[in-house]
Amino acid sequence: MLAFHSSFETPEYLEEDFTPVDLKKCIEKTRRDIDIAYAGFDNALDADVIDSYIYEINSLQKRYAHLTELAAAQTSDNGEGLYKHSPIRTIVSHVFG
């Protein structure tokens, strides 16, 4: 739904960004976002806020797993994968034992 400031103004449209995505930067950003979400979870006191951090952390972990799987599937110039195993396994084993 478009919102107008007055009846005579035209709506403003946002242009989409079609620049290529750097997989390594996406992985690093997601890792930082996970760290930030864990810090928020550790300091949350309200039950609803704690629940929201749990959902956010789960979502970010799934994104991180997906990105690391993509990175592992890509091959470098010498034919080897970027990662030999997914770093998410270390996180999951650390969190869930």
Image (tube, rainbow, N blue to C red):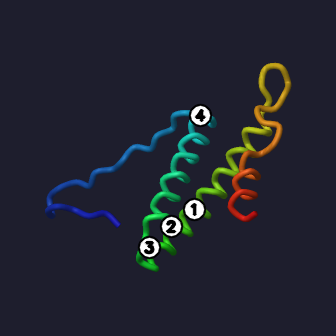
Residue most toward the right?
A: 79
Using the numbered discs, state the Cα–Cα distance from disc 4 to disc 2 in whole angstroms: 26 Å
The residue under the point 62% across, 35% down is 24
Residue 93 image offset from top left, x and y in percent: 75, 58
Along the line of sight, the residue nearer the viewer: 40 or 20:
40
- Disc on res. 70: none
According to the picture, the residue beneath numbered tag 2 turns out to be 53
Residue 17 drawn above or below residue 6 = above
Residue contact at pointers 1 and 2, CB within 8 angstroms: yes
Residue at image mark 4:
22
The amino acid on which the numbered mark 3 sits, given as a three-letter code, is Val
What secondary structure is found at the residue carrying circle 1? helix
Marks 3 and 2 close (CB-CB < 8 Å):
yes
| Badge 4 or badge 2: first in the primary sequence | 4
Query: Which residue, given by chain and number where applicable, does mark 3 sit on?
Result: 49
Pinpoint residue 27: horizontal percent, then vertical percent. 61, 42
Residue at 48% of width from left, 73% of height from top?
A: 50
Quote the CA–CA distance across marks 1 and 2. 6 Å
Q: Which residue is mark 1?
A: 57
Which quadrant: the N terminus? bottom left
- Disc with the residue nearer the chain's start (4 vs 1): 4
* On screen, residue 19 above or below 30: above
Residue type at the position of mark 4: Asp
- Closer to the N terminus: mark 3 or mark 1? 3
Name the front one of labels 4 and 1.
1
* Residue 15 % position (x, y): 39, 43
Q: In the image, what residue type sits under mark 1?
A: Ile
**Which residue is drawn at the image coordinates 68% and 46% (left, top)?**
67
